[in-house]
Image (cartoon, helix red, strand yellow):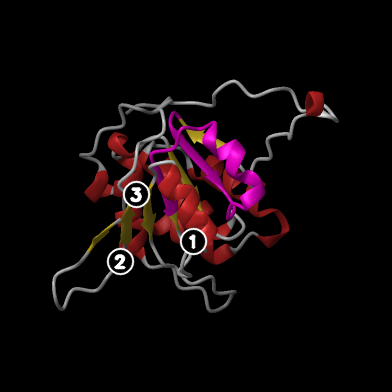
Amino acid sequence: MKFEGHPEGEEEICRTIEVVSSPAPVVCGLKSVPAADDDCNGENPYIPPLNFSLVDNGIFRSGFPDSANFSFLQTLGLRSIICLCPEPYPAAYMEFIKSNGIKLFQFGIEGYKEPFVNIPEDTIREALKVVLDIRNHPVLIHCKRGKHRTGCLVGCLRKLQRWCLTSVFDEYQRFAAAKARVSDQRFMELFDVSSLKHMPLTFSCSRR
C-alpha cells in the first residue's frame, strides 16, 4: 500500500492510497449484467450504490458504497475511487480496494448543513484534475449520499463541458431532490473553470 505525502507546511488536500495489487480489467462501461429478476436465476443480484449514475464515458457517481454493492462495482472495472468524505475508509472497503487494484483519492470535505456550508474551491479543483485524467478511468465519485458534495463536483465538471447553468442545476436537483441547497448552486455558478480549460476532454461525450 502506497501513501502519497505532501511537502512540509503544505496543507493536505487529498489523501491518495494506492494498493499494489493485480489491477482489475479496465473497461469504459459496465460489463454484462444479468437482468434484475426477482430470483435472478438463483444467484445474488447486483445492487448499485445509492444514487448511482453514469456521468460520462468512464466516470460514475454514487452515494457511499455498501458491502452489498461490491459485486456490482466489480462490473465497472474501476481504476480509481474519489471519496469526498473526510472519514477514514472502513476496513472492509479497503480490503475491496486492495483485492481489485483500485486507487483511492480522498478529498475530505465536511458535510455541513446550511447556512454553515463551506465548499473549499481548491479541493474541488484538485478533485476535478483527478476526474479529468483519463489514466484514472474508470472512476467512481462518491460522498455520503451522492447529493451535495458529489453534485457540486459533477456540476463543476459540467461547466467545464460548457453546459448551460440551467442544465447544470437540473442535474444537481435530480439527485438532491428536496435536499437541494441554494449555497451549492451558488458555488457551481461562481466556480472558475479557467485554470482547467487546458486539460483535454478526450473521454467525454461532449468534447469542447
Across and down, in percent, residue 133 comes to 28, 39
Label disc, if present, on residue 13 of the rendered structure: 2
Q: Is residue 144 above or below residue 171?
A: below
Instruction: Give the Cα distance between marks 3 and 2.
Output: 12 Å
Across and down, in percent, residue 178 comes to 72, 58
* Circle 3 SS class: helix
Quarter of the rendering containing residue 7: bottom left
Name the residue: 44% across, 44% down. 99
Name the residue: 54% across, 23% down. 31
Query: In the depicted view, which residue is nearer to us: 93 or 153?
Result: 93
Residue 152 appears in view: no
Inspect the magenta stretch and tell me whether residue 61 lies in it.
yes
Magenta region, residue range? 57-82
Residue 146 placement, left or right of 156: right
Q: Is residue 169 above or below residue 181?
A: above
Q: How packed is label 2: few (under 14 Cα within 10 Å), some, or many (20 or more)?
A: some
Figure label count? 3
Q: Are marks 3 and 1 in contact (CB under 8 Å)?
A: no
Query: In the depicted view, which residue is nearer to us: 29 or 54?
Result: 29
Q: Disc 3 designates what residue?
A: 128
Residue 26 placement, left or right of 183: left
Label disc, if present, on residue 186 of the rendered structure: 1
Name the residue: 68% across, 35% down. 46
